[in-house]
Image (cartoon, grey):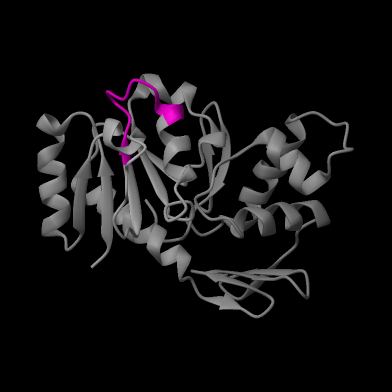
Amino acid sequence: MYRVLFITDDWVHKKTLKSALVERQFSVTPVTSADVLKESFAPPRTDLLVADLERCPDPGTLCHAIKRERTLKEVPLVLLVTETQLGRLDVSWGFDDYLTLPVSATRLSERLNFLMWKLHRVELKNGFVLGELTIDVERYEVRVRGEPVDLTYKEFELLKFLASHPSKVFSREALLDKVWGYDYYGGTRTVDVHIRRLRSKIETHGAAYVETVRNVGYKFLGPDSS
């Protein structure tokens, strides 16, 4: 049973979501954003964090407060946001994923289970196995359903970096810095071009691995996420 710390300032409308998670074998501790921001806040043992930002007065401050807690710093954080809040999401908040409200308990529970799966995903000594996708870091090889995929060096480096941080959202600027290097002078369109080519090569059998996060950047999805 995974322990979820559920943060929301709208329990009137989120109680049913909490109850549904409990029915799906999650242990849920409800708190408000004001509780988290108190100096005396002592979080319980937690496997997953859900922060409902719909009525949160200062989402950025809340997220930073969560990640300042030593025991919560590495805990996966999922944000629940409205359509109008999407453009204001900031990767510096340290969230691992987000879902747009209204959200079903089924979708939320699936995403929480996926985040726990990716923490314990199968890893090769020198690479990753993610569903039908195999990435061999030592040999610089990528295979889909056992068939080799012809990637350029930068396409491989981009895939390796994203796959090493599943569900983590990266801006185009961050990807330029991490994959191309801080001294690269090309524009962010370079990232878009490489992402498009990468998708065309590894998503040949209907599986989605890379997702565009509107107004933010890109993230890598595991094969079981939806």
Quadrant assignment, res 147? bottom right
Q: Is residue 206 above or below residue 186?
A: below
Return the x and y of residue 156 as percentages of the image width and height.
74, 58
Vertical order, 25 against 96 (above or below): below
Q: Nearer the viewer, residue 111 or 182?
A: 182
Q: Position of residue 114 (x, y in %)?
A: 38, 59
Q: Residue at x 32, y 49 (%)?
A: 42
Q: Split into 4 quadrants, where in the image is the N terminus?
A: bottom left
Query: Considering depth in this image, is 9 or 224 the residue closer to the camera?
Result: 9
Residue at the farthest front position: 40
Residue at image location 48% in from the left, 55% down from the top: 74
**Residue 83's spot in the image, x, y percent?**
36, 23
* Left or right of 109, for residue 93: right
Give the side of residue 88 with respect to residue 177, left or right.
left
Query: Is 13 situated above or below 113?
Result: above
Q: Measuring 47% from the left and 59% from the top, which residue is drawn there? A: 222
Q: Quadrant of residue 174?
A: top right
Residue shown at the point (75%, 62%) measured from the top left: 150
Does residue 101 belong to the magenta stretch? Answer: no
Farthest bottom residue? 125
In this picture, which residue range is highlighted in magenta?
51-61
Q: Is 165 left, or right, of 206 in this rendering?
A: right
Answer with the quarter of the image where residue 219 lies: top right
Q: Position of residue 137 (x, y in %)?
A: 73, 70
